[in-house]
Structures are given as structure tokens and as C-alpha cells.
Image: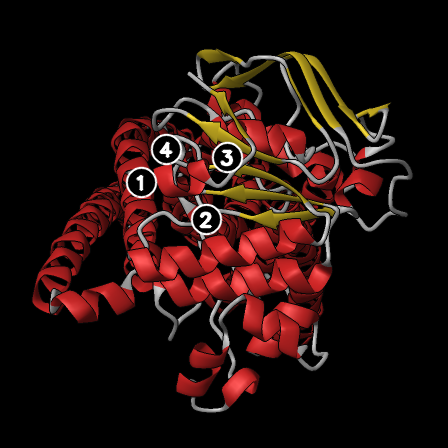
Amino acid sequence: MPDPQEPSTDPDRARLRRALGRERRAIGIGAALSAAAALVWPLQALCIAGVFAGLLTGNGITPGLAAVLFVALAGLRAGLTWLAEGVLFRASQNVIAAERAAILRREAQGAAESSFGGPGAVAALAAEKLEALHPYITRYAPAQARVAVVPPLILILAFWQSWAVGIVLLMAGPLIPVFMALVGWAAKAASEKQMAEIGHLSDLLVDRLAALPDVRVLDAGALVTSRFAEAAEALRARTMAVLRIAFLSSTVLELFAALGVAMVAVWVGFSLLGLLSWGAWGGAILPFAGIFLLLLAPDFFQPLRDLAAAWHDRAGALAVAGELAAWEAEAPAEILGTGGAGEPLPGAATVRAEGLTARRGDRLIAYPDFTVAPGEKLALSGPSGAGKTTLLRVLAGLERAEAGRVEVCGAALNDGTADGWRARLGWMPQQVAFLARSLRYNVGFGAALRPEVVEAAALDGVIATLPQGDRTVLGETGAGLSGGEARRVMLARALEARPDVLLADEPTADLDFETADRVTEGLLELAARGCTLIVATHDPRLIARMDRVVAVS
């Protein structure tokens, strides 16, 4: 029996084979059990043909014995089918779970958004699109195995009884796979476009949900709704294109199968009536052989029809494999260390960068050498896209440098020191990020907020506006908070953690002067306690409050 996943140099097929991984053996076993279940039917057909032939000629198997055999074979077939479906279902769940875990592991490393898409596209791939592998494994693989064994067996039995029926089946059978291959090309292209549209719509949803407070402030609800309507209509059109191909191909394939069965039925009927005397070996066909062939003819086409129906599952799985390959092709921002908690790295919190370069896409960014002493306030300045955020991520060990050396606390920043170094760091990213827990939990993991932290971060006004104060649950993007309020909560988090070094990415961006001044004063309050500040910023007023500036270009 062939491998359910045919070998090919096609990258999508190669990625699909790799996704199946260790479950390929289980899939093969499930497909073999499914094929074995299908092979039971010819034995059942023998029982039925024997009974009816006996009623017509008086020579045949007794109905009682035939019924016992038929029921026993039916039980065997049901048991084999049950085992096959169970094995294939578990294999499918394991494959999907493994791929989903791989996506979550990589995305949890904090990789920057890539050309593959934003969080919505990745979430759609992990949550929705991977489910397309389930019908491929549970339907296409066993259908392919049944096609490999059932039609050839029935064709041999047909030629054994009648060369005319054998020729009819031999001519009608290949039309189904030929047409199936032609349809497959169009189905795969339509499935890929549908998958891309799902990712686009998911990205749009995530983006608009994150900007919901701004949408309400700008009264842009009608515009946002119209954009959603356009995206939903595009997805509907792509989905209907896939369904049109599926319905058209199913109609044509059913026509071929119906014509084949009808030709067999006509020949058998006229032969039994004595109107045709050719087509059988050595004379007229016997009632037993005629009834047996009539029972086998539909099952000759059934595996081909099953495979044709599952061909669209194959197209969907290949489209998902293509997306997985595209996602993998985006080189992730590889984190140093394990990303877990570690003992704080000992020594003075110095930071030194020498010959540092980092890659962002196809561009190689070279940074100037610099050293930051404990307690110093350093501004990283430069145009948008110059690589300031990338430099902060490299200094935090969230990305690996292309070349050069980062030294922290007198030791090289590497896999062995990164976890301990991050235990001494505070991090203020440009895009706010919260746990879906209370404000108190987001600042101090549930501990009561210290008055000095509330004062330094100017959180008193923020807490007063929340319905449940500091116990109000925040969304992951700080729903219910303005941009400035969210920044102040993140500043409070940094103050509460009492880091030795704080890396802040555009902490005053898009804030009004008053809010920016409050955030700046909070940062300076943290520095006054001995914390080293490394701030990436365009804000000239914040730059003026720093000890020195390193230009990134």
C-alpha cells in the first residue's frame, strides 16, 4: 500500500510531510485498517448474490446461513472502520497540537511582526487554518489507501466473470482521477486565496480592536464597519469560489460513476434476459455472476468518489502547508537564554556594545560603540526605522546580534547570562501590553500598590476614573485606558519592579505635553534611585533630560 502522503519535491507537499512527522506511521495504520474494512464488502456481496441466485435457480446458499455470514462480516467491517477512524483522529489531533505548539513557542519568544502578517494572521493560522489538516488526515489518507486496493480487486473480479463489464469499468474508472487532477489545480489556487483572505480579515479585526478607543473618540465607527464589510465580502467571494469548484467537480464525477454503473446494469440485465449473448467467458452469464457484478459495480467507483471528495481536503491542507512554510521562512528574532526566570546576574550594571550589528530583513544595521555606566541616563536617537528598537531588543537579549559583542555586568551577553541579565532589567515597549488581569496585578502581580509608585507614575488620576479602581480588569491592550494612561501603568510596573536597568522604547511618543512630562518625571524619579536608563526616543525634551545621546542611523 502506498504512503498516504505521496513524495514530491513540491515545497508545500514537503512541508506537509514534515508536519505529519512521527504520526505518519499511525496514519498509515489507520489507512490500512480503512482499506481492510472496504475489502469486506466483496465477501458480503457474495452472500447476497448467493441468496438471490438460489431464489432464481434453486442452487445457492441458504438464506439463514447467508444472513449469519452477512451480519458477521458487517460487524467486522464496522469494527475495522471504528478502529481506523479512532487511529486517524488521534493522529490528526497530535499533528495539529504539535504544529500549534510550535507556533506558540516561537511567537512567545517575542519575535517582531514579519511580512507573513500580524498577530491576527498568526492567530488565524494557529487556531483556524491548522484545522484543515484534520479532514486531510482522516479522509484523504484512508481514501487514497482504499483507491489503491479496492478498485483493482473489483476490476480483477469483474474480468474474471465478464470481459465486457471489466472493459466498462476500465474505461470509466480512469476518467475520475484525470478530472480530479484537473480540478485539483484550480481547487488549490482557490484554497490559497481563501486562506490569505482569512489571515487578512483576522489582522484587520485585531488592529481595529486595539484601536477601539481611538475609533470611538474619532467617531469613525461607520468607516471601520464599511472596511469590515468589504473584507467580509472578499472572504465570502473566495469561499464561494472554493465551493463552486467543489460542487462542479462533484457533479461531473457523480455523472461518470452513474454512467459506469448504468452500463454494467444494462448489460447484466439484457444478458440475464437472453437478449445479449456476448461479454461473458464461454457463453451466457449466470444469475449469480450477474448479481455479484451489479453489487460490485457501485463499490468500484465509491473509493474514487471518496478520493475526489477528499481532493478538496488535500487542496486545503496543501494551502495550510504553504502558509506554514511562509511563516517558517520568516527568520524569527531568536531569544538568548531560555526566556525563563533566573538568578540576577551579579556585578555592577554596566552595558557595553562593541562592533555591534543586527539584521532587520535584508538590511544590516551597524551601531556605534558605547558604554553605559551604572546610574547613567542614555538616549538613543535617530530617524524612524534606523534600528533603535532592534538595538534595545539586542541589549535585552531578545534578539541575537549579527556580529559584535554586548557586555553586561562585566560578562558577555549570551545564552548562559541572558536570563540572569533580564532578571535585572525593566522593559517599556512602545506598544503597550498587559495581562488580562486587574491593574494591580499588572503592576505588582496582585500586591497592593505602594503610594510612592502611584505618585511617581501619576496613577492616582487613572485609578480614580476606573470603575473598580486598581482592581479593574484590563484587556491585553489596555482597554479602557488612554494611550497616556497605559504608558503610566507601564511606568508604574517598572517602578514597582525596581530594576537596575530600564530599557524604554519611545516612552513619550504620541502623548500630549502634560502626559509626556509626567512620564518623563517618572523616568527621572527611577533614575534618581540609581536605575540606569537607556531610552530610544524622538522627543527633544526627553533627550535634553538625559546625560548623553548616542545617534543611531
Percent from the top left, x then y, of residue 539?
A: 36, 40
Q: How far apart are marks 1 and 3 (CA)?
A: 12 Å
Q: Distance between the residues labelled 4 and 2?
A: 69 Å
Q: Residues within 10 Å of mark 2 (few under 14, many from 20)?
A: many
Q: Is residue 333 visible?
A: no
Residue hosting label 2: 507
Instruction: Give the amino acid at mark 1.
Output: Ala
Residue 334 higher or lower than 208, as above or below: above
Residue 512 higher or lower than 333, as above or below: below
Instruction: Give the amino acid at mark 4.
Output: Gly
Percent from the top left, x then y, of residue 6?
A: 56, 25
As drawn, the label of residue 196 is 1
Closest to the camera, between mark 1 and mark 4, is 1
Percent from the top left, x then y, of residue 231?
A: 18, 52
Q: Distance between the residues labelled 2 and 1?
A: 35 Å
User: Which image quadrant: the C terminus?
Assistant: top left
Mark 3 and mark 2 lie on one chain; the one further toward the N terminus is 3
Looking at the picture, tell me which residue is in the foreground, 421 or 215.
421
Q: Can residue 79 be seen in this view?
A: yes
Residue extending furthest toward the bottom:
468
Badge 2 marks a residue whose secondary structure is loop
Looking at the picture, tell me which residue is in the foreground, 399 or 541.
541
Instruction: Give the amino acid at mark 2.
Output: Pro
As drawn, the label of residue 324 is 3
Residue 470 higher or lower than 101, as above or below: below
